Image: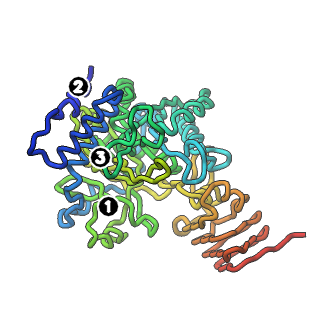
């Protein structure tokens, strides 16, 4: 039995009697305690974890969450290291890879792009899904270096069943896949602060996966953390499942092992599109992640200044497993709670509810010798929208070794183009109907498409291209068109004979 299992639960420690001097917060906490200590809730380990999170939220929600701007300092050179300083070293790849496991956050659905099921199965490049590419990358690595790096998937209750069926097709690959579920917590009504769920079998919309900060407890409770440590694994590389740039980097792994760092966060240069991204700061001698929600209103412009805060968090994280376990057992991972407002429909009415979430990046301040490493932008290639999908499907990138996207050498200037597709392109099906053939965009700087627009075959886009279709009209860009520094408006239909 582990020391975590021996500890008394927060619910056991909760006083069962509330006296006349109890505060409003005491009453709310006690109300939740009674609710979760009834029926089949009381048998659930997850409900005990949820109660701890809820109690911490109630006790802290009246405390000002904004940071004191005067306490913020920029990290030193030792705390944020440039990636170029890690390269050109002799590496024993097989040796260091024997200490590594890779984890992909696989809890999200593809609903934002109009898809059903896990987002990780959306086809993103040359017939490959996010998950296909992740498996092929580990397969290639293990084959090349004769290593045995495992791939872990942290699923949610939304994605687990489908994922279990999908991963069967990888049984013959040189990549051992293991998966576990993150927690399933009850949403709470915003007004009463009581759970939407009346019992463990309540409707699906009564529950939510509590953010990727839940990784630590879920990895521990699943038994996977102990399994990894017992197998000699020291480092876990964590990344979002939809970040196509988050591949295993031997230089960062070697640097982490050499320096004894317990936590490394990959940062990259901010652009105008990333001004709200979280950044590393030093506060009271500790490296911390600063999110825009924590910034006082009068300093928001300072936070968005890309000269002052040059880097942002990619959520590519390297974490020491033994340090992680110790912090979990000692209950020291108390990341800031993010109350996320959603709604559920009951009796035909939308009712506001809260989801209490945490972020894995916020845990950096609890680890010793934590670092940031400023990596090339190529390691941050997320696909959140069909605008992103257009870019990664295009000739701007090559599929190296059949598994990793690399920027084409022909793109020798600037960063990635800025692509903005309007609401007609929001869903994947509509995107595929309107852009059945991906245009060539190596020389593109900025693309905006709005309205009922269709692109033909072999279209080339260069410089700044803006296409805006009038309401109720249609624009067809003919096959073979070359658009360079142009604005197309109104309507345009050219029929080929």
Query: Which is nearer the eye, 437 or 142?
Result: 437
Q: Nearer the viewer, mark 1 or mark 3?
A: 1
- The residue to which callout 2 is attached is 3
Local packing at callout 1 (Cα closer than 10 Å; few below 14, some 14-19, many 20+) is some
The x and y percentages for residue 432 are 69, 56
Q: Position of residue 43 (x, y in %)?
A: 33, 25
> Residue 218, located in which quarter of the rendered image?
top left
In terms of secondary structure, where does tag 3 sit?
helix
Q: Nearer the viewer, mark 2 or mark 1?
A: 1
**What whole-number distance in Å separates the C-alpha atoms at marks 1 and 3?**
16 Å
Return the residue at label 1: 293
- Which residue is at a point 41% across and 41% down the rendered structure image? 237
- Image point (47%, 55%), residue name: 380
Q: CA distance from mark 2 to mark 3?
A: 21 Å
Residue at the image point whose x is 28% and y is 60% from the top? 294
- In percent of the image, x 76 and y 76: which residue is there? 492
Task: Identify the mark nearer the N-term, 2 or 1.
Answer: 2
Where is the C terminus found, in terms of image quarters?
Answer: bottom right
| Residue 254 showing in the rendered view | no
Placement of 287 over or under 236, stated as above or below: below
Q: Which residue is mark 3?
A: 363
Instruction: Specify the farthest residue to the top.
Output: 1
Q: Between residue 294 and residue 399, name the one nearer to us.
A: 294
Question: Are dots 2 and 3 in contact, CB under 8 Å?
Answer: no
State which tag comes first along the sequence, 2 or 3. Answer: 2
């Amino acid at each position: 039995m582990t020391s975590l299992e021996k500890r008394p639960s927060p619910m056991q420690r909760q006083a069962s009697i509330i006296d006349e001097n109890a505060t409003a917060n005491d009453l709310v906490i006690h109300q939740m305690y009674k609710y979760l200590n009834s029926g089949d809730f009381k048998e659930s380990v997850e409900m005990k974890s949820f109660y701890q999170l809820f109690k911490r939220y109630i006790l802290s929600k009246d405390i000002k969450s904004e940071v004191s701007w005067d306490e913020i300092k920029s990290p030193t050179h030792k705390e944020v290291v440039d990636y170029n300083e890690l390269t050109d070293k002799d590496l024993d790849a097989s040796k260091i890879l024997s200490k590594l496991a890779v984890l992909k956050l696989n809890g999200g659905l593809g609903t934002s792009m109009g898809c059903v099921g896990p987002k990780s199965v959306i086809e993103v490049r040359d017939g490959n899904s996010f998950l296909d590419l992740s498996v092929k990358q580990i397969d290639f690595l293990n084959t090349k270096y004769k290593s045995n790096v495992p791939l872990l998937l942290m699923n949610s209750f939304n994605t687990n069943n489908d994922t279990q069926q999908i991963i069967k097709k990888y049984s013959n690959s040189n990549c051992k896949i293991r998966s576990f579920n993150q927690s399933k917590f009850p949403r709470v009504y915003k007004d009463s602060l009581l759970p939407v769920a009346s019992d463990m079998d309540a409707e699906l919309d009564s529950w939510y996966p509590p953010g990727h900060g839940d990784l630590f407890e879920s990895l521990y409770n699943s038994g996977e953390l102990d399994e990894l440590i017992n197998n000699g694994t020291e480092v876990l590389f964590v990344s979002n499942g939809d970040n196509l740039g988050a591949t295993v980097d031997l230089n960062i792994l070697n640097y982490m092992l050499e320096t004894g760092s317990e936590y490394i966060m990959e940062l990259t240069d901010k652009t105008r599109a990333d001004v709200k991204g979280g950044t590393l700061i030093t506060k009271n001698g500790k490296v911390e992640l600063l999110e825009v929600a924590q910034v006082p209103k009068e300093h928001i412009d300072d936070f968005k200044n890309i000269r002052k805060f040059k880097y942002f968090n990619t959520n590519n994280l390297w974490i020491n497993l033994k340090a992680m376990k110790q912090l979990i057992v000692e209950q020291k991972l108390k990341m800031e709670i993010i109350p996320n407002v959603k709604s559920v429909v009951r009796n035909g009415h939308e009712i506001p509810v809260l989801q209490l979430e945490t972020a894995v990046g916020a845990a950096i301040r609890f680890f010793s010798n934590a670092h940031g490493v400023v990596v090339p932008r190529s390691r941050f290639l997320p696909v959140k929208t069909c605008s992103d999908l257009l870019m990664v499907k295009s000739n701007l990138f090559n599929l190296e070794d059949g598994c990793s996207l690399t920027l084409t050498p022909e793109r020798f200037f600037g960063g990635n183009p800025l692509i903005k597709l309007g609401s007609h392109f929001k869903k994947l099906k509509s995107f595929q109907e309107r852009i059945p053939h991906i245009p060539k965009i190596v020389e593109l700087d900025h693309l905006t498409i709005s309205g009922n627009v269709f692109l033909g075959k072999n279209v080339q886009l260069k410089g700044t291209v803006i296409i805006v279709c009038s309401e109720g009209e249609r624009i067809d860009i003919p096959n073979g068109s070359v658009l360079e520094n142009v604005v197309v408006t109104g309507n345009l239909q050219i029929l080929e004979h």
